[in-house]
Image (tube, rainbow, N blue to C red):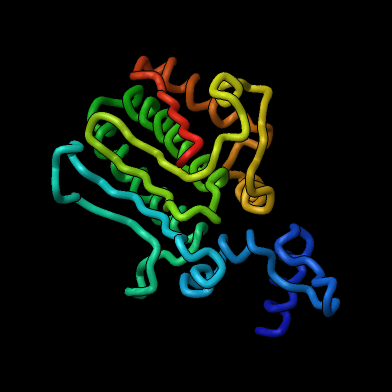
């Protein structure tokens, strides 16, 4: 029944803070966080003019052309339009890239691939959750053969050492953060940076480097 489904959706949105009462007219309306998570691209751009999420796959930084790309847009029906749909497509793309690299060397190698995938997905969630979407800069992830770069706008709300600590968390976008927690796609206690660091240490890869610039 479409009416029951619509009511169930509304109840879900209200219960999890994706809808709040507008004090001006007393009507429940979507929050900005819900708009970013589930809204249409053009509607999001009306409130957040610079909104764009971009995953670029290249062999190395010197390459002019990319191998593949996932980005938010209204140009085509199959393009993601919001944070959630971008995460789903980017996550699937990343998993396929990792599987291609880890599937040839037996069970232990595949297990390492799962551990590496978990760390990269945590970085993807962290990048999306903590971005300042009011900024004029976009969110960009660049996948190279040798390393991955995650860039998002907004001054860090914790120090570098706190980012890699298991005890410190300061979500910028609480509604977006809670959405990923509800979906069991992010660390509830703010241990994302710590999870990434431990995985890289255990896999004996290059350790993650963290750069922050107040101007960006």
* Percent x, y of residue 86: 44, 57
Q: State the image quarter where residue 115 is shown.
A: top left
Left or right of 112? Residue 46 is right
Image: 193 above or below 97: above
The residue at the point 47 percent across, 70 percent down is 41
Tell me the residue at 47%/39% (across/down): 215
**Residue at 40% from the left image edge and 62% from the top image edge:** 72
Q: Pick whichever, 179 or 62, lies toward us.
A: 62
How many circles with numbers are drawn on the protein?
0
Residue 169 in the image: state x and y as whole percent: 66, 32
**Closest to the observer, 106 or 94:** 94
Q: Which residue is drawn at 24% across and 29% down?
A: 146
Q: What x and y, as percent, mark residue 147?
A: 29, 31
Give the x, y percent position of residue 11. 77, 69
173 left or right of 196 in image: right
| Left or right placement of residue 27 versus residue 204 in this view | right
State whether residue 10 is above or below residue 184: below
Kindly indicate the quadrant of the structure image that contains residue 98. Answer: top left
- Identity of the residue furthest to the front in this view: 215
Q: Specify the quadrant that holds the N terminus.
A: bottom right
| Quarter of the figure with the C terminus | top left
Say which quarter of the image contains residue 2: bottom right
């Amino acid at each position: 029944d479409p009416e029951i489904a619509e009511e169930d959706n509304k109840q879900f949105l209200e219960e999890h803070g994706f809808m709040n009462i507008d004090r001006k007219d007393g009507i429940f309306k979507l929050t900005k966080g819900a708009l970013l998570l589930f809204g249409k691209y053009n509607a999001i751009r009306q409130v957040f003019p610079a909104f764009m999420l971009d995953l670029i796959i290249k062999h190395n930084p010197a390459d002019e052309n990319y191998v593949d790309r996932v980005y938010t847009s209204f140009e085509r029906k199959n393009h993601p339009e919001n944070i959630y749909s971008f995460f789903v497509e980017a996550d699937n793309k990343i998993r396929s890239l990792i599987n291609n690299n880890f599937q040839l060397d037996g069970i232990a190698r595949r297990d390492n691939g799962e551990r590496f995938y978990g760390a990269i997905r945590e970085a993807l969630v962290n990048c999306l959750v903590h971005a300042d979407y009011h900024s004029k800069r976009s969110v960009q992830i660049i996948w190279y053969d040798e390393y991955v770069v995650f860039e998002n706008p907004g001054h860090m709300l914790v120090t570098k050492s706190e980012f890699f600590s298991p005890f410190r968390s300061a979500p910028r976008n609480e509604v977006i953060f809670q959405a990923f927690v509800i979906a069991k796609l992010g660390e509830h206690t703010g241990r994302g940076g710590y999870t990434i660091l431990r995985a890289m240490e255990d896999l004996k890869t290059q350790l993650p480097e963290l750069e922050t610039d107040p101007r960006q």
